[in-house]
Amino acid sequence: MTTELQTTLSPEQRALLGQLTPQEQGFTRIMLPRLGMYSQDKFEGKGKSAKLVKEAGMFYTEVETDEKGEDGKKLWEKTEIGTSIEGVILYHRKQLSHYDEASEKYTSSPIYDSAEDVVPLFSDKKEIHRGTPAELKAKYAYTDPKDGKVKSSLEELRVLYVLKDEQVYQMSLRGSSMWSFSTYAKSCLVSAVLTKFSSEAKENGAIAWNQMSFDAVRELTPEEADTVIDNVQKIATSIASEKAYFASLEANRSSMTNAVEELNTPLVEGKGMSAEEF
């Protein structure tokens, strides 16, 4: 319980005490509802009795509820919102992901920003590797028997932060939809325009799917731009805090490792201190 106290400290004194007093490290992680699109039709049942339960090209939102499942985790409520929507793409980042069908386990990285970032890779809530995206993808390299090319089963996703109806959502893109966005992002400043999200049917042999498409509807109004700037600044601040937090943990871990190594290093002439000198 925190009791509010009346203070007579000057702003200068309070600021100085804030600088001198150790602070607990931490950050506010971006936790957002999800925005997505079904890339393929999904049916329940077989033959004439089969029922279409997921329509390719249908967009949906997912919002976390207070209800919990058997595993104790909170459940997400999914709502379909149509085959075409509009919103503003505030920010885009990247993430590595791999699903092993044999073990039914996901391997993924935190969301990151550049090819130079050193990121951990987690599976079953445990860190299994750490490195740059290229180094991590190399660990999952294989030769595709169809074309003889070296590929990686560790897939790079594109993560978008989208402002729609005054709510910020997180959207993950993969495959052809990701490349469609990359092309669109080169054509305009995505945070300065209202974007129409829709899709187009694609086929490759027996495989059919819907690829997400992006079109600029119009430039934002000054009022809309102010709202976008405010949201982008919040996202950027949260990302910077998260990176600073993990950088400090890595620095502390490295410092601790060096200290242990020094303690375990035998003393030699001219280095370290003997027990008597200590």
Image (tube, rainbow, N blue to C red):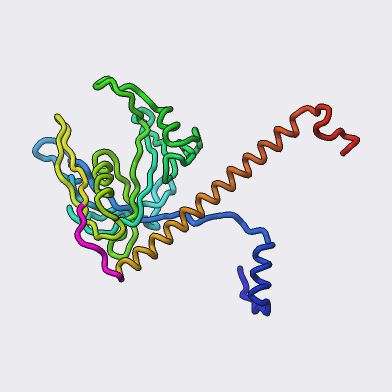
Please determine whether, in this image, residue 165 is positioned above or below residue 133: below
Specify the quadrant that holds the N terminus.
bottom right
Residue at the (28%, 20%) spot, across then down:
148
Is residue 63 something that shows in the picture? Answer: no
Please determine whether, in this image, residue 54 is positioned above or below residue 97: below
Residue 187 placement, left or right of 12: left
In the rendered image, residue 220 lying in the magenta stretch gets the answer: yes
**Viewer-nearest residue: 44 or 42:** 42
Residue at the (24%, 39%) spot, across then down:
176
Where in the figure is residue 226, as x and y percent of width and height? 35, 68
Where in the figure is residue 104, as x and y percent of width and height? 37, 33
Is residue 156 something that shows in the picture? Answer: yes
**Viewer-nearest residue: 7 or 67:** 7
Residue 246 placement, left or right of 178: right
Specify the quadrant that holds the C terminus.
top right
Report the residue that reaches farthest toward the right: 276
Magenta residues, as a range?
Answer: 215-222
Where in the figure is residue 112, as x and y percent of width and height? 43, 45
Predominant SS along the magenta part: strand
Count of numbered circles on the image:
0
In the rendered image, residue 240 lying in the magenta stretch gets the answer: no
Where in the figure is residue 206, as x and y percent of width and height? 14, 30
Report the residue that reaches farthest toward the left: 48
Residue 173 placement, left or right of 106: left
Residue at the (78%, 27%) spot, across then down:
266
State which quadrant residue 216 falls in: bottom left
Residue at the (65%, 65%) spot, across then down:
18
